[in-house]
Structure formats: C-alpha cells, structure tokens
Image (cartoon, rainbow, N blue to C red):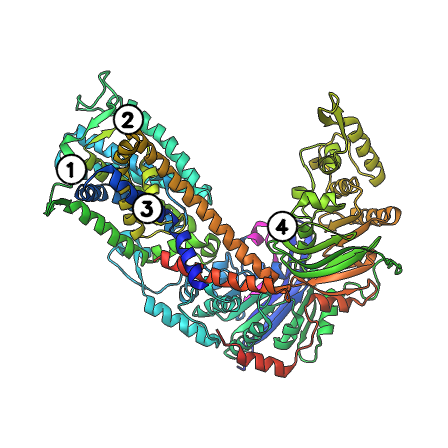
Amino acid sequence: MGQTGPLLSLKNISKDFYGNVVLQNVGFDLHEGEILGLVGENGAGKTTLMSILFGMPVIAETGGFTGTIELNGQEMHFASPFDALDAGLGMVHQEFSLIPGFTTTENIVLNRESMKPSILNDAFGDRMSTLDRPEMKTRAVGAIKKLGVKLDPDMLVSEMPVGHKQFTEIAREISRKNTKILILDEPTAVLTESEALILLDSLKKLAREGVGIIFISHRLREVAQIADQIVVLRDGVAVKNVPAAGVTIKDIASWMVGRSISGEAGPREESRALEEEIFSVEHLWVDMPGESVRDVGFSVNKGEIFGIGGLAGQGKLGIPNGIMGLYPAGGTVHLEGKEISLNNPAAALKAGMSFVSEDRRGVGLLLDESLEWNIAFTAIQIHGQYLKPVLGGLFTQRDSKAMEGLCKEYIQLLDIKCTGTKQKAKELSGGNQQKICLAKAFAMKPNVLFVSEPTRGIDVGAKKLVIDTLKKYNREYGTTIIMISSELEELRSICDRIAIIDEGKIAGILPPSADVAEFGILMAGATDSPSKTKRQSAAEEAPRA
Amino acid sequence: MSAKKGIAKFFSDYAVVIIFVLLTVFSIGPSGLSISYIIQEIITRLGRNSFLVLSLLLPIYAGMGINFAMTLGAMAGQIGLIFAIDWGIAGWQGLVVAFLVGLPVSLLLGWVCGKVMNMAKGREMVTGYILAFFISGVYQFFVLYVMGSVIPMRNSSITLSRGFGVRNTLNLESVRQALDNIVLLKIGPFSIPLITFVIIAVLCVFIVWFKKTKLGQDMRAVGQDMAVAEAAGIPVERTRIVAILISTVLACVGQIIFLQNMGNMATYNAHDQTSFFAAAAILVGGASVTHASIPNVFIGVILLHAMYIVSPLAGQNLFGSAMIGEYFRQFIGYGVIAISLVLYAWKAKKAADATRLGLRLGAAGESTIVKANGDSGNGTGSAGKGTAGGSK
C-alpha cells in the first residue's frame, strides 16, 4: 500500500454525559489495510466512541464532544450516520439489521437498489421506479466475492444459518462503492468457532484490498490473532495503543481489567470453610432478551456469598431472573434438596428464595406506594403475613400497624433516609431505594437471596453501605447470598467464590484472591488456546451449507 | 414423518379456508338453490366487492395489519356519490364525478389516518377500527347538518324535509349499475359486468407492478422490520402514510363500485360494515394479518359470498327460520376474524418457542432435547418457506 498519511485519525476525543466523563483524550490512527483491535470492558467507552465517529444524534443531543475526526487528513463533521456512510464508513452492529423475509441480494442492496425509471417517475418521483433485479444480483454477487465467502444470493435471511447473516451484513457494508473503513462491533459474538474463523479470514482479505478495519471484540484471542494494532480502552482512557506483534492475550486482559493492579481495592475476605450445599443449578437455560443463558450449572454452600460476574449481554443477569421465574427457563434447580419449579415466581418465593432485581424501578419497587407497602408487599402476597382476620376470619385485611412496625425496624436497621414510613418510594434517592429493595427481600427471611447489580446507578458512598449491609446480613443471619454484578472489584471485595459467565455459560469459577488477569481472560472467552492447524482445517471445511 | 408434518401444516395454514369450504358445500343442498343461480350471484358479488377487498393489500404489505380504517375511504366515496346525485349527473359520468369529489376527501382522510397510525405503531388495527368510529361521527355531522345548511343542496328529493341534511336512504337510480351495464357480457346463462372486471384487473396489475417498484420494496422492508428499514435510510413513516393513503383512495373507489351495483345507499350506515366484510373476506381467503396476496382476495370473496348466498335459505329450510341463517352470517363473519387473529398469535408464539429451543443446545447429552431441537429446525425452515410463498 505504501501510503503515508493515516486513513482515519481520531485526535483528543473527549465526551461527557452531563459531567460524567466517559471518554478522555482518546486518539488513534487507522491506516489503509490495517486492522485495529479495540478492546475494553463494558462502560470503557467503546460504544460512545463509535457513536461519535458515526455522528449519532445522541451525541449532539447530549452536548457534543471535543476533539477532531480526520479522514484522509481532512477534518470531518458528521451530522448523522448517513453522512458517515457517505464519507466511506461502514458499520456492522452486534445485532443483525437484516430484513428476515428478504433475500441475501435484497438485503445487501437495501435502500440502494438498482432502478429502472418508469412512466410514473415524473408524477410521483423516483420511488415509483421499478427494481432492476438482475443488476441488483450482480452487485450483490460482486460484494460476496470481494468478501471471499460462499453465500447464496437468493436465499431468504430467515432461512440462513447465523454465520451467513453476519456475512450478509458485512457484504452490505462493503457493497457501497466508497467504503474505505469498516467497523465491526462484536462480529463474532453469535458465531460458532468455525464461522468466526472464516469471518476473520475474510476480514484479512478485505484488509489486503486496502480497507481499514476497526474490530471490536471481547474475544481477545481473535483480537490477538487478527489485529495489526491494539487499542485498549479503560474507563474512557486509551490506556494502551500498541502494535499487536508480541502481545499476549494475558497482557491484553490485564490492561483491560486491571484497574488497580498495584493497589488492591479494599481488604479481601479470608477464605471460609463452608461445606454444606444448600443450592444447586444444573443445565439452566433462560430466554431473557439480550441476556440469554445457555447451559449453566453451579452449586452454592450454606452461608456463602457467591458472586457471578461477566460482561454485559453474556447472560449473568439471566441466571437470577430465570431461577426466580421472571423469564422462560428450563433445567433443574434444587434448594435444600428440593426441586424448585421454574417459570413460577410464586413458587420460587415460597421456597425461600428472594430476589433484589437489577431493574429497581420496574420490578423492584411500587414507586407510587408508601415505604410500608413496598417493604411488606412480597411478604403479604407470599406468606400472608401482616394481615389480620376480620369478622372471625371471613376475610383478611392489611394490618397497618404491623406494616408500620416492620418498616420502622428496617428504616433503623438499614439507615434509610426518608421523611417517614408513609413516604412514596419514588421520592427516595437511588441508594435509599435500593435499601428498600433489600429490606423487602430481608422481610421474606429468605434462605437464599439473589442480589442483581445491587450498586448500579447509586453513588459511591451508598455503594459501600449496600455492600456492607449485605455482608452484615450474611454474617449475622447466615443467609446465603448470590450476588450478580458487573463490577469485578465489588465482587472480589465481598464474595467467597466468583463465577464468570461468558456466552451463556460458566467460563470458570475463581476465588476472589485470583489475579485480575485470570478474570479478564475468562471474561474474554479465551479459555483454550487456538492451534494453527485446527484453524486451517476448520476454515477449509467451513464453506459447507 | 415429514409428510405428516406437511399435512398438519397445510391444515393449520388453511384452517379457515377449509372450514369455509366445508360449511358452504354442506349448505348448498339444504338451501335448494340451483348451481347456476349461485354462480351468477358470485359473479355479481365478485364485481361488487373485490375492489374493496383489494384495497386492504398494501397496508398488509407495509406491516400495518388489516386496515380497518378503510371505512374512511368508503365514507369519502359516499360523499362523492351524494354530490353526484345532488348535481343530477347520471350514468357512468356520475360515478366519475363521485370519484373526483371523493378523491381529495379520501386523500385528506388517508393522510390523517396515516399520521395517527404512525403514533400508534404496532396497534394499527385497533387504532384504525376506533378511528373509523370517530370519523363516522364527523361524517354524520357533515351529512346530517352541513349538507343543505352550509353547502347548498339543489335536489330537494334527497334532502330532509326540514331543509338541511340528507335523507336516510338515498336512491341511486340515476347511477344504478352504470358501470356494470356499460358492457354486459352474456355467456350462456350468465351475465358478466365486463368493465367492472376490467377495472378490477387493472388494479391487480397495478398492485403486481407496484410491488416491483422501489416504493413497493420499501413497503415490504418497512413491513418486516421498521428499525432496520429506518437504519437503511428508508423514510419509514412516509412509506406507511403512503400505504394507508393508497388504501383509503382505493376504498373510496371500491365503495363507489359497491354502491352503484347495489343501487341504493343507507346514507348514515352504508359504511359501517365495509371494513368488517372486507376483512372477513381476505381472511377467509387464507390471508393473515401479515401475509396476503391477490389470490387470497378472490378466493375469499368467492367463499364468503357463496356462504352468504346459501346460508339464509339453508337456515330457512333446516331450522324453519331465515333469521338463523342471518345469524350464521354475522356469527361466522366475526368468528373468522377472531379465529384468524388467534391463529396468528398462536403461530407467533410457536415460532418464539422454536427459537427458544436453540438455547437448550448447551444441555447436550439429553437425547430428547437434541431431537426436539432438530425438529424445531425443520419447523422453522418450512415456516420460512411458507412465508415466502405467501408474499409472492
């Protein structure tokens, strides 16, 4: 290629959402024919960076950004994603954006169809032109050829294997005449291993033809395999920008996760001897949109705090939601030796499990009701507590006094800041709302307590209080807690063991004292090392179907 | 096993059609009607109703379900007819005038309707149904009060005796079958309104051609996934408005054709059941809320009306009361719509379950699950093919 200037150059990109800094002076260059691997945890700023690059309206709506984007040395200002497309940027999103009832061809040339003018053009405009299907097909076949894969141009997307959908999507981007830069956001997330390998090969082929590629993936193995340059984002800062040669997966993982490798945050729990199994899960699957669980099995000992971590979208949230019956699920779940029937929230609650949902305002609280109601509600529904018989037990009525007493007890115990037991739940701050959710769960006196993202969206001080409350409750009452969190450090500060979920399965279970890089590798789905021969054979066998 | 599956699929896809064919065939005997009479009646009703039913197609392509708001177009057509009668224009020229008056009204109503439906994405059918009731109120105000008081009426025989408002029943004698009788083809015992059928054929050709245009392609894309279409730069809301607009204008024409054949018009409620009969017809023809084709329209009109022709007499002869047959008409009409909607929801749920099975892949070693998964793969595959066939 031998070009001197970079194709795309991001300089000093900074962005904050109402004072909350998400990107700070991020910059990198992308050259013609180069593959740049962009890695980072959730919330590291990858999505925001791509939104800026693509001129997504959300960026301008939230106050714009600082820094410059240069394309072939020229500064660009994209007002909308369509400007970015016109300038030669192509984006393949994580979710498929294909029309299911259309063929490969129709999807590749979607809204850029070849047309023949018709007599109605003068009266009603270009949209009354008829489609030139043979020409459309020629263009689609050209794009498929450029990609170097086998795709049937007449196959309906709804009948395709997942891999073909991904290829169709990429073919659509490169079928634009001027696409010079291709951005792929987690393109291999839904692919099987052999499909992913074919994809990587075709990306390399595209790069050889001069397309610049930004490859975003949490599968570090693939990044290490394919990238020429690796940029690691962490907390909105580009912590590393290095050539890929000689970089190991472990290096990338520790750059990505290692928030404070030198100064470990907070004291660790000394390992406790907890023997008696109380809760076990086998072959659990859960159909929770965006958080599907495929096959999860684990067991938890009595009195343990069991942590479940992993990147967003990998299925960690699906586990408690599935077990508690909020989303369709299957598999076997045992609590104290008894099988729990799934898809039945009442049965799960009756069996002695409680759940503090990550969706605090939606699932967790009755926003327009008093704190008394909120705390006692589940106990009333499930155990029939806080009710008093009327007319000799003919029917029952709420026992306001008992509810008020219960509420006062927890306000004191958890130090909830409120004006009184009659205050409405929506009027409290995020941290105090979370405490109400905990109180509601505690009021059930559960044997096993699920806590999902307990510190999401609350401030630092409140986070510590919530964590301390959980720990205290665990120590004093011996309640088994299963805590799901995106924040690894939080899990490491409180849990006895931590399972990492990747692609709907448990990638591994580690003690909190394990090295951060080990957690990073598990999250990155790089448990087994690839072998060259295996790769090639898979690539040869793959253009089946 | 696959043959058995194929048969099961055939029955589930065409359940409504099969029920109808059986009911009609069994009613022909007891009705005591001759086959030639039934055929003549069906020919007449094909000419009368097909255009209205065809107007439902485009919104279905655009993913907006059955356009119950086609009633708006029907009202526009009626307003056109009232003026044509008032101005004393007879014959097919009267129908043309009725259309020219109805056209701007139906364009306006269609645009309003499209705007409203864009605000109620995903609930177009119920929105359209209720919108039709609301606009019916506006129509009644217009016909009952504005006509004759604000807009001068010349023809005193169609106005109410108090001086304004239109009479309850309007005699369309001057335009009665003006279109049908231009060329009335006689084949054996049957007479065929040729020009009416030519107009219907032209509409069919237009629809087939329209599907091949860029706009038609955009409409299909919008119908299948609005978000994807939007991301590809297709003006989704505009496309949806155009679909409703065309549907409303076609319904206006359809209602004029319908009423010229009937020869009189119930001024205040002729449009009440227009959308209901049209929806019943297209669903009887094997269409669903998401898929419909031109054959569905004609099969539906033939089956539904064969049923309507024979059921009152069959009721009379079997149960001694024509009311029972009349009751069957209503009962079956609404029943068909209900069955179609339930079947559609049921199929969508089955499809969701089939994809859910994919999640169990992880639990290998359990042979039953693996097998179930294989089956579901076949199921979705053939369902996909069914979809493709339906949209042709």
Find the magenta span and give its range.
A58-70
- Quadrant hosting residue A99: bottom left
Both on one chain, marks 3 and 4?
A: no
Q: Count residues near mark 3 (Cα–Cα under 10 Å), then give few for <14, some for 14-19, many for 20+.
A: few
Chain label for disc 2: B
Query: Is A59 inside the magenta-drawn segment?
Result: yes
Residue at x 57% of width, y 57% of height: B356
Q: Which residue is mark 4?
A: A327
Do marks 3 and 1 both belong to one polypeptide chain?
A: yes
Q: Nearer the viewer, mark 3 or mark 4?
A: 3
Q: Within 10 Å of the Cα at label 2, are there few (<14), some (14-19), or many (20+) other Cα atoms?
A: many
Few, some or many residues within 10 Å of mark 1 (<14, 14–19, 20+): many
SS class of the residue under badge 1?
loop
Instruction: Confirm or deny contact between disc 2 and disc 1 (CB under 8 A).
Output: no
A62 shown above or below A46:
above
The Cα atoms of the two marked residues, 2 and 1, are separated by: 24 Å
Q: Residue at x 79, y 45 (%)?
A: A446
Q: Which residue is mark 3?
A: B22
Q: Are marks 2 and 4 in contact (CB under 8 Å)?
A: no
- SS at badge 4: loop
Looking at the image, residue A483 sits to the left or right of residue B359; the answer is: right
Kind of residue sitting beneath label 4: Tyr
Q: Is residue B250 visible?
A: no
Label 3 vs label 4: CA separation?
42 Å
Tell me the mark number nearer the camera, choosing from 2 and 1: 1
Check disc 2 and report the residue beneath it. B143
Q: Residues within 10 Å of mark 4 (few under 14, many from 20)?
A: many
Please identify the quarter of the rendering in which residue B49 is found.
top left
Percent position (x, y) of residue A203?
54, 74
